[in-house]
Each structure stands twice: as C-alpha cells, then as structure tokens.
Image (spheres, grey):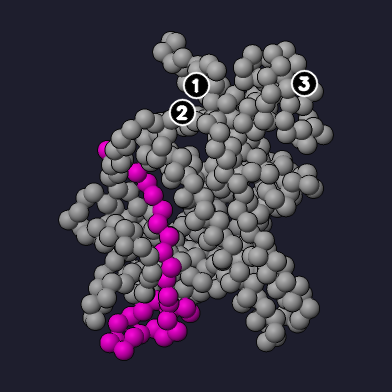
C-alpha cells in the first residue's frame, strides 16, 4: 500500500453555447480556446519583457543572466492584468501556471546538466501544445451531477462539461471529488486540444494496493530493438505493431493537404481525415503497449532494461522511420511507471554496456559484431566456447545478468548461470 501519483486522461465534449437548456453554465469551445490563448499570451508577454531587460543589460555592459523567479514574474503579471482586462476571463491559477512554466524553462536553460535551449515564444503557428492548467483549490475542479442527474466535470470559472472515460477511472474521479474521501485527491487538471478534439488530464494522488500475484514470478531482461519492439531473456519476443494501413492513410492525406489552399473546403476535409487516422495510429499503439507492459509486470518480480540512447538512433536514415513510428521510448517509460506502481523492481543498465558483444555463457567479448556496420549480423557463434547465439536473445540475457549484478547487496543475489 502506497500513495501513487497518476494522470487520468478523459475526453471532453465542450458545447458551442455558454449555457445549456437548464440555465447551467457550460464550458464552451470559445471559453476553452480563450483560456488557451490567454495562457499563451501571458507566457509570451513575460518572455518579451525579460528579453527586453536582457537587451538593456547587454547594452550597458552587464552580464545578461537574469534571475527569473515568482516575485519578479508576479509583478509583470499584475501589470498585464491592469493593461489587458480580458485576462480576467481566465481562472487565476491558470494565469499563474503560465509564469511557473516560464520560470521552469529558464531554470532548465541555466542548468548546465540539462543543456536546454533558451525559451522561445509560443506563437500560434509554431506552438505544438494547446493547453492550460487549473489547480484544484477548495474543490473547484470536481465531478458533479447536472440538473438532469448526469455526471459532468466542473471546471472553475468555465462551467460543466460532458466527459467520456472508463468505469474504473470514473469511480476514481468521483471519489476524488468527494471532500469526505481522503484516499483520492485531485491535484489539478490540464485541458488540451489535440487534433480538433479536447481532453482533460487529471493529476490525482490515491492509495494504491498492488495486486497479489500467485505463482512463480520471473526475473527478466529486456533488449529494445528496431526490427522487434523487445526481446525478453526468457525467449519471448514482442514484435513491432503493424501500422501500415494507418501510415498509408496519413501520407495520403498529408499530400492532399499540400495540394490545396489553406482553409479551403478540400484542405479542411483532408486535415480532418488526417487527424482521424493520426488518432487511430496513436490509440492503436498505446493500447498495444499497455497490454504488453501489463503482461510483463504482472508476471515479473525483477525487470532490467538497457538505458539506450534512442534519440541517437533517429540520426541513422535506415532506422529513423521505424523509431519514430514505433516509439520504443514510450514503451520503456510506460514499463518503468507500471513497475513503480506495482512494486516490481526495475533496474536500468548503463547504455555503454556491450550487451550484444558478450557471450552469455562464457562472458567473453566478441568484437567482430561491434558497430553499426555489423547490425545485419543477427546470429553468431562465440569464437571461444563455440556457442551459437541469437543476437537479441543473447543481449537480453546479458542485460538481466548485469541488472542483477548492479542491485546485488553483499552477495545476497546470485547471478544465474546457464
């Protein structure tokens, strides 16, 4: 039993009017788009003010490093509120969140370990994220019943909105909306627009009790690849998901969009179909990953993976398309979070560990299969003990052995031998 932080994403259906037939205030599309625009406006205006101040420092021969914190940004925000009255349409915590995100962006930029780029403006054309966040203060974000008795999401200053989610998540959110239930707490909600659809992502804290598993649990090492999504040390393989149909449709409608003038009827129709097939691809991949992650975690007591530098794989023209399509980093992140929630031990092996070159039986290195040029070698014989190896299966076993060695405490854990 432990307290778990979890994000629950639900689809919301905002209306086109600000009030429903019963006179209740509703979160309309215009209100949501207005809040998204206000969040972006505050972020950009504060950033432009800071850039102007940095320019003055450079002009007069001073260091351009500016300390960006809550006190300085709050002064800028108060000036903006007095100059632009329309900012009052947004919820107060949503306005404050814009400046918090700007402060975090500057903190990442000044942190030498992260090597983040300097913050840039969130212009409407260049921005890829259309979101705003509302903090749950005094239960102003909750699940409530409308006058007809249906459950709706109540958003502070926006109104109620219809939502769709599973029965399990709906019960969690209802418990989090009950002030008498301390086992679930809604911390904040992020409203976002993705491909013309609107979603609300609830961040909740709740007491999680892992499922009790009966029967033997396996210790597993996982090798992430390109030709296959993953290979397990017990011999099981997880193939890449076939997304050929979705990919062909996406490419087709991308071409149609490029052949028509923006905001024309045919361009909008092609964009609608492009968004539809993009959603299908993402949902299909997410469902596939969730099922495989659940299977691995449910049947394992120890999981070891290699902390691969997957971003560098994208620079290889032969691997980049498969990496972007199958998103193995998303699979690894899901696996790590699931292991943490269910209490399964999860170990990352260093990325410079030569898992593919080591013979899992005699533990000696075969340098002939090293390098990108030798990726085509999928099977090899150890020159020392003459054992025949499958490249991926051998790597998965070496990752398991290395993971067990890393977590060993005073020799309490023994490395399994063949």
> Is residue 17 visible in the rendered structure shown here?
yes
- Please tell me whether mark 2 sits on a helix, a strand or a loop: strand
Residue at x-position 38% and y-position 65%: 165
The picture places residue 405, in percent across and down from the top left corner, at 52, 18
Foreground label between 2 and 1: 2
Work out whether 361 lies above or below 27: above
- Residue 75 is at least partly visible in this image: no
Residue 219 got which mark? 2
Q: From the viewer's side, name the closer residue of 250 and 52.
A: 250
Q: Which residues are magenta?
A: 1-30
Looking at the image, which is closer to me, 190 or 169?
169
Residue depicted at x 62% and y 49%: 240
Please name the residue that numbered disc 1 is placed on: 404
Question: Dividing the picture into quarters, in which one does residue 67 lie?
Answer: top right
Q: Which mark is residue 367?
A: 3
Q: Is residue 196 above or below residue 179?
A: below
């Amino acid at each position: 039993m432990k307290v778990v932080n979890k994000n629950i994403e639900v689809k919301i259906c905002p209306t086109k009017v600000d009030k429903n037939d019963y006179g209740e205030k509703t979160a309309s599309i215009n209100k949501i788009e207005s809040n998204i625009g206000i969040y972006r406006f505050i972020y950009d205006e504060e950033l432009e003010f800071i850039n102007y101040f940095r320019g003055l420092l450079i002009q007069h021969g001073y260091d351009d490093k500016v300390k960006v914190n809550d006190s300085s940004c709050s002064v800028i925000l108060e000036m903006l509120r007095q100059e632009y009255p329309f900012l009052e349409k947004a919820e107060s915590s949503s306005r404050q969140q814009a400046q918090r995100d700007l402060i975090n962006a500057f903190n990442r930029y000044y942190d030498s370990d992260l090597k983040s780029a300097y913050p840039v403006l969130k212009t409407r054309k260049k921005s890829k994220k259309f979101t705003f966040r509302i903090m749950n203060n005094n239960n102003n974000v909750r699940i409530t019943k409308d006058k007809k008795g249906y459950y709706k999401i109540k958003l502070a200053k926006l109104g109620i909105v219809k939502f769709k989610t599973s029965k399990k998540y709906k019960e969690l959110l209802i418990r989090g909306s009950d002030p008498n239930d301390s086992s679930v707490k809604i911390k904040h909600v992020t409203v976002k627009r993705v491909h013309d659809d609107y979603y609300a992502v609830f961040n909740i804290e709740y007491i999680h009790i892992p499922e009790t598993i009966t029967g033997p649990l396996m210790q597993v090492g996982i090798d992430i690849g390109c030709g296959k999504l993953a290979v397990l040390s017990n011999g099981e393989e997880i193939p890449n998901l076939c997304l050929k149909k979705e990919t062909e449709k996406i490419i087709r409608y991308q071409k149609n969009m490029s052949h028509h003038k923006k905001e024309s009827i045919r361009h909008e129709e092609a964009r609608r179909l492009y968004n539809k097939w993009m959603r299908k691809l993402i949902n299909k991949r997410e469902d596939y990953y969730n099922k495989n992650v659940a299977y691995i975690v449910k049947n394992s007591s120890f999981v070891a993976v290699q902390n691969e530098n997957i971003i560098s794989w994208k620079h290889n023209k032969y691997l980049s398309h498969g990496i972007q399509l199958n998103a193995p980093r998303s699979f690894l992140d899901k696996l790590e979070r699931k292991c943490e929630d269910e209490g399964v031990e999860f170990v990352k092996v260093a990325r410079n560990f030569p898992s593919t070159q080591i013979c899992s039986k005699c533990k000696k290195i075969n340098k002939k299969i090293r390098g990108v040029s030798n990726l085509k070698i999928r099977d090899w014989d150890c020159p020392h003990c003459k054992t025949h190896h499958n490249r991926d299966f051998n790597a998965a076993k070496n990752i398991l052995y290395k993971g067990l060695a890393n977590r060993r405490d005073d020799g309490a854990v023994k490395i399994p031998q063949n």
